[in-house]
Structure formats: C-alpha cells, structure tokens
Image (cartoon, helix red, strand yellow):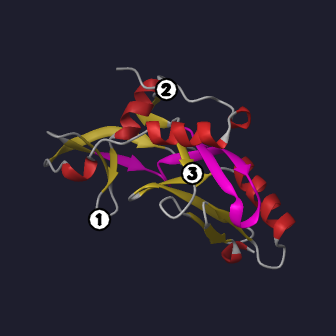
C-alpha cells in the first residue's frame, strides 16, 4: 500500500489538518520486534538527512520513507532497520532525520509548533515530542524527538524561525511553548 503524500508546504494547512497528518504517520510496533541482528544493511544516513546504500544516494523518496518507518535506535545507541524476522545495522552520522519546515500557530502558552521532516512525517512538538536546544550560540544543535530513541535535527531555516519567534515573545528568557510545554533555549542563548 503506498504511503500518503505529505504536502511540501505547511503554510497552507490548518493546525487541524496538520494534526490529522501527524496521526496518519503511525509507526509499526518496532518495540515488539526483537529478531537477532542478521547483518549490515550497508545504509548510511548522512548528517544532512540523505540516505545512501553502498555509497549511492537512495533517490526513491518512497523507499526512504518506508525505511524510515522501521528505523529503531537500540539501547547501545546504534541504529537498525527492524522487521519481525530480521534486524540490520545502519550507520547514522548525526541524527537520522531532518526537520525541514516549521509552522507556528498561536502565541506564548497557546502556541503549537508543527514540523515537517525530510521523510514526510508531520510532528507536533509537545510533551511527547520535545524540542531540545543543545550546543552553544556559535554552534546550536536543536533537535526534535520523533519517537522513542529517534530524533530529527532541526535544520537552519526552521531553527532561525524558532529563534525569531522566541526573541519576539520573551527576549529575556528565550524559549518557546508548544502544546502546553515550554522548551528553553537557555543552553544556546
């Protein structure tokens, strides 16, 4: 069954439409699948979010989207593609996904932030999908929890949008609200 296509521009969608898209991207029960490690997938996920197989970019977006649904992080920090019958290692240079677009609706405590990932998922930041602002002002490393153990690096354009929103609202205590949760930017301020 083909995966639903995610719009390339979130600005035209309402928050209700974004929430519906987020709910439609449910993951398989990866935590219930525990087959033995059967080998190396020969897949590498570059720091910029591109997926490679044997050194060649995987150009089929639907294939990358499919693989992204079965990517799991193990307790030792390694990444694997897992199915009910096999598990293969994956090399991840930084974080496996990129948050490439953000849409903000509301202000302060009533704000909701929706992110589009490079693999098509829509993630609504909040208590189940926290944003962390690590690094420093010179080298910020913002990330968004996608699912347990799997994060997306928030890329430059959406990060700058978040900084602008935070500076407009509370320049003395930088941070943002989304879905009733405050995410401090103090680590990079």
Crowding at mark 1 (Cα within 10 Å: few <14, some 14-19, many 20+)? few
The CA distance from mark 2 to mark 3 is: 22 Å
Q: Magenta residues: mostly which secondary structure? A: strand
Residue 173 % position (x, y): 77, 78
Q: Residues within 10 Å of mark 3 (few under 14, many from 20)?
A: many
Span of residues in magenta: 89-118
Dot 1 corresponds to which residue? 76
Q: Nearer the viewer, mark 2 or mark 3?
A: 3
Q: Earlier in the sequence, mark 3 or mark 1?
A: 1
Residue 19: name its quadrant.
top right
Q: Which residue is mark 2?
A: 61
Q: Position of residue 163 (x, y in %)?
A: 77, 61
Left or right side of 72 for 17 = right
- Residue 112 falls within the magenta-colored stretch: yes
170 versus 121 height, above or below: below
Q: CA distance from mark 3 to mark 1?
A: 27 Å
Upstream in sequence: badge 2 or badge 3: 2
Residue identifier under label 3: 124
Residue 117 coordinates in the image, percent (x, y): 56, 42
Q: Secondary structure at mark 1?
A: loop
Residue drawn at (37%, 35%) of the image: 67
Label 2's element? Answer: helix
């Amino acid at each position: 069954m083909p995966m639903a296509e995610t719009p390339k521009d979130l600005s035209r969608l309402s928050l209700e439409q974004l929430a519906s898209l987020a709910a439609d991207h449910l993951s398989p029960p990866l935590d219930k699948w525990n087959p033995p490690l059967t080998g190396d997938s020969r897949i590498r996920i570059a720091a910029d979010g591109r997926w490679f197989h044997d050194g060649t970019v995987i150009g089929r977006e639907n294939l990358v989207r499919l693989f992204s649904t079965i990517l799991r992080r193990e307790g030792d920090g390694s990444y694997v593609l897992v199915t009910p019958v096999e598990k293969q290692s994956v090399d991840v240079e930084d974080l496996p996904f990129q948050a490439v677009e953000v849409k903000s609706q509301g202000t302060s405590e009533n704000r909701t932030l929706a992110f589009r990932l490079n693999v098509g998922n829509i993630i609504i930041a909040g208590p189940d999908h926290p944003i962390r602002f690590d690094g420093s002002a010179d080298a910020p490393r913002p990330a968004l929890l996608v699912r347990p153990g799997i994060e997306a690096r928030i890329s430059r354009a959406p990060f700058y949008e978040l900084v602008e929103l935070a500076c407009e609202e509370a320049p003395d205590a930088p941070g943002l609200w989304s879905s009733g949760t405050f995410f401090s930017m103090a680590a990079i301020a």
